[in-house]
Amino acid sequence: MCGRYFLVDDPAGLRTFYGCDHDTPNHPASWNVAPTQDSLVVRRHPETGARHLGLLRWGLVPRWAKDDSGGARLMNARADGVADKPSFRDAFARRRCLVPASGFYEWRQEGAGPKQPYAIALRSGEPMTLAGLWEGWKRPDGTWLRTYTIVTTDANALMQPLHHRMPVILPRDAWAAWLGEEEAGRDALLDLLRPFPQEALRIWPVDKRVNRFSENDAELLRRAEAADPPAGLDDPPEACRRPG
């Protein structure tokens, strides 16, 4: 699963990184993005074809939903059902997006007490590009709520000691097909939803304060001591260590 992530990259830099058009949203760094919060998402404009960077709420609300209360439960979409499940199939067919992240968190039970959180980021220090779907839901007052979900797949060997699922991380050469800029059929799109190579990732234990949604500062990414850490630990990339 992917239930929490961090995005500390500058929005102007993300706009350039993804080749987006339009104005850059003014959005602060977050070291603890949680479901029901707004974060940055890259979408393709259906008329101009340009990439736009905008703020959407995490937790997908289908167009046919009676209200928006169930969005938090749809923070993730499993790759093995994303093309067929009623909550996701229309978005998979027409409204795919890229979700920028500096990295994400996962938890592991180590002895008694709260689970130990770990941060996972790209070894290169670049932003991660997570596969997402988005939807627009019309509120009773006529305004639109735009939401997104993050697609998950089987964990690679590095992630398996923490969880059996991980978010789909798309390489740059898959962005155009996922956004619909290049022609790609259902099977080709589903083939993109595979585990990311473990050698491209780094993982390290972080402060248990991240367990609380209210905690949100750069110190969350400082390497912490873990009681029974898995193999393959590393240090945080420089991009994740800058002060808030």
Image: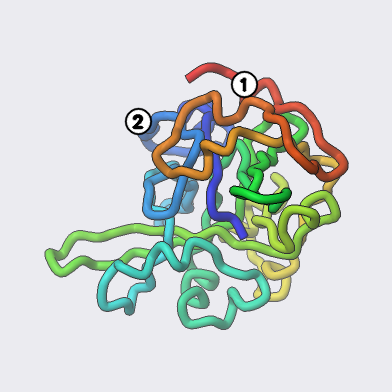
Q: Nearer the viewer, mark 1 or mark 2?
A: 1
Residue occupying the point 47% across, 27% down: 217
Residue ID for mark 1:
241
Dot 1: element? loop
Q: Is residue 129 left or right of residue 141?
A: right
Which residue shows up at 43% across the image and 54% down it? Answer: 35
Question: In the rendered image, which quarter is residue 132 located in?
Answer: bottom right
Q: Mark 1 or mark 2: which comes first in sequence? A: 2
- Three-letter amino acid code of the residue under disc 2: Asn
Q: Residue placed at 80% from the left, 31% from the top?
A: 234
Circle 1 crowding by C-alpha within 10 Å: few under 14, some 14–19, many from 20: some
Is 41 or 204 nearer to us in this picture? Answer: 204
Residue holding disc 2: 26
In percent of the image, x 33 and y 79: which residue is there? 64
The answer to which of 11 and 61 lies nearer the viewer is 61
44 above or below 120? below
Residue 177: x and y in percent read 64, 58
In-image side of 177 versus 19 (left or right): right
Say which amino acid is labelled 1.
Arg
Residue 149 appearing in the image: yes
Percent position (x, y) of residue 59?
Answer: 42, 60
Q: State the image quarter where residue 121 is shown.
A: top right
Judging depth in this view, the residue of 30 and 97 nearest the camera is 30
Total marks placed:
2
Residue 106 location in percent, x, y?
A: 64, 49
Asked whether the viewer can see residue 181, the reply is no
